[in-house]
Image: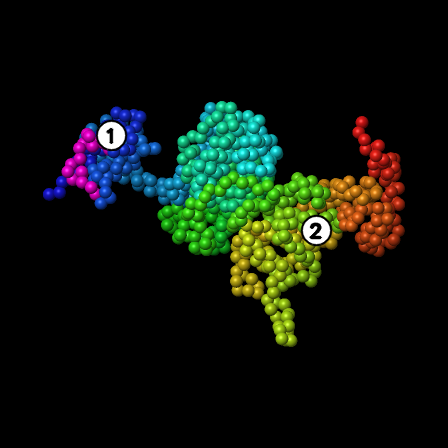
Amino acid sequence: MTESTGPNRRKRIRAVLEILSEHPEGVPNSKDPGGVFHLAVQRVPLSPTEATINASNLVRGNASLSFDSIGLVVAGWITKTDGIWRITPEGLRALDLYPGADELFGQMAKLSVAQTARRKANRAEQLRTVLVSRNPKEEVFRATTALFVQKGLREGSSVFDPDRDVWTVDAISELRARFIEVPDMGEGTFVEKLRLQLAEASDEARLLMAELVTWQVLPIFDGAIGFAKKKERISAILQTMEEPAVIPDEVLKGLKNGVVHPGQAMNSNTFQAMVLVLSVVETYLQSSIEVQQEVLSDPWAWKSFVFSVKGRSFPTQRNALLYMVHPETFTDIFSDEDKGLVRNSFISSDADSTGDVDRDLFNIGLRMQQETGAPVDYYDEQHKPLWKKGASRPTAQPEPVDDVTPTNGEHLATGLEREPFPAADAALSGRVYIEEKWLQESLDLLENKRQLIFFGPPGTGKTFIALALAEHVARDEAELVQFHPSYSYEDFFQGYRPVTVNGALSYELKDGPLRRIVDKANKAKHRNFVLVIDEINRGNLAKIFGELYFLLEYRHRKISLQYSEETFELPDNLFIIGTMNTSDRSIALMDAAMRRRFAFRELHPAQSPVSEVLHGWLLANKSNDLGSEPALLLQQLNKKITDPSFSIGPSYLMPKVGGITQDVLTRIWESEILPLLEEHHYGEGKVILKQYRLETLRAEIAMLNPIPIEDLNGGGPEDNERD
């Protein structure tokens, strides 16, 4: 007859609770002397059957105890953390309430069944309402990032040192002054330069920086940045403190459990990634309590908040911040491109789309969780082939990427992650005679909206600025096309064109400039491509864009083409800049659907930044013989033009070759400016043009400014000396 091991198993479970009650500090999970298995077997020795070895090469009695102890945990009577078993208050009460081994074991089994049922119910509710963690690593990440949300964003204290308050406006403002506003673009790693930047910083600012750096690298898996590299980066900051803090064990555990491959941009642009994280946290800390409470409780308010913070677009880092604060709502997909592809592959129908890719992914995730009863990993072998061939989370463990901050605007490595726009710099500003701030705002608008139009009167530099920005962003991947009334869809995108084959007329399907640049952009996802459309409002936009209207707003949504059976989509790394002459057609006459799809920036001679352009050019141009007189004449001229749409821009008085002399000024005025104004006053007679002549304007300026124009221009060298 086979020996029953049941009685011993029940007795041994009671023995475990008694042992743990005698050792409130806990007992190691070990079979060595002093370990819980060794002590339990001492009290309830193994029977001959229990002493045998099972198929897993384990002692049967120990294997049974390990299995039965799961019931103790589920019942809430013990905990197992960091290799130590500890009894809970509920476990102590159970010892008193159930003195017999059989009674105790039976109650444990009942509680385990009930708790398991509750967990299943809770699990079903979670699968229906939130995005569930895919695996234990993600559970650890969520628990760790929650510390930064609670201790940092909610309480304003410290994740590393509970006795300090470092998530404060003062500390973040100090970091802005030392880190963001004085960037170190020289040689060296991110850490080396950061230590120099924080050399004179307060301990509060240093500790906050260490915690923000920790938070930024927290979701990144070890194959991208190894645990040792993460710890080294953080410790290097902590070591600069006068009263150093240490990284808590629970945070170290989180750093070992990264879950996401961040993409090339986050890996190679550590400085810009941290600038964005600091800017978001700074804006949050400066917000009202009501705003703070709203964004932490409402995931969609948090998304709007994150994407409203000014700065570089950096979509991967902004998407990471969504996931770091609300992982139960936002997926761990940081790439905009991958988000769009996943959404398009798994959404039930176009009618189910909300128009917001993150809301769509949330709804898709809930649906698939309920269908399968399990969380969804879009990068696993089951789902990956359904949305993107060859795309996967790396499973190999490549060498961790060192900290590198590019110093020349070039990224050191390519990949599928689109490069963020380079920031506006002095070179770009000097090229167009416009301040960096306005240029950066334009770059941010373009990167976020993807379509931007510069509009204004003639001569305001719309095309020149558009091309300068396009070349700054895309270098040699910028192209120009000009619309006109006869321009069509077939010219712009694709259509059949007449060709001669062996002397006979035939027709071939030819690609236009938009199709060609899209094909190039699809072959180099890491690069930015810009198409400049000059005089965009001179064409029939509905006729030219056709079904492509839809794609300007819904990137990654595929549509059918007029002349091809294949489906087509606009890639994320293609940007469009249009120019629009307001003297030709008003924006108000533009198709409403098109206006909704573009951001607009006005360039007007009477407003900044155009109002300062000519002054800047005159000062910079050494061959200028007239001082500031051309700027004064242009200003006076535009005051007399009643319709702002017909104002004259400064470009007319900025010749491409040579400087501006009196003869050059007169020639430009007589041959370019006056004929333009004559057209504006067509039918009103030649007399009206006298008010715009140089001699008339000079006389008016003289009356307004008693000081002679030549004195306003600067006079002799002695006039430029300071007292």
Residue at 53%, 44% in the rendered image: 265
In the structure shown, which secondary structural element does the residue marked by tag 2 occupy? helix
Check if mark 2's residue and mark 1's residue have beta carbons within 8 Å: no
Residue at left offset 36%, top offset 48%: 373
The residue positioned farthest toward the front in the image shown = 187
The residue most toward the left is 1
Tell me if 383 is positioned left or right of 192 in this view: left
What amino acid is found at the position of numbered circle 1 in the picture?
Answer: Pro
Residue 381 relative to residue 55: left or right? right
Q: Residues within 10 Å of mark 1 (few under 14, many from 20)?
A: few
Quarter in which the N terminus is drawn: top left
Give the label, 2 or 1, closer to the camera. 1
The tag earlier along the polypeptide, 2 or 1, is: 1
Numbered badge on residue 33? 1
Observer-nearest of 595 and 196: 196
Residue 108 vs residue 238, the one in the foreground? 238
Amino acid at circle 2: Thr
> How packed is label 2: few (under 14 Cα within 10 Å), some, or many (20 or more)?
many
603 in the magenta segment: no
Residue at the disc numbered 2? 463
Q: Which residues are magenta?
A: 35-54
Q: Position of residue 619 (x, y in %)?
A: 77, 40
Residue 459 percent across, percent down from the top left? 75, 49
Q: Residue 438: x percent and y percent?
A: 67, 41
Residue 307 — which label?
A: none
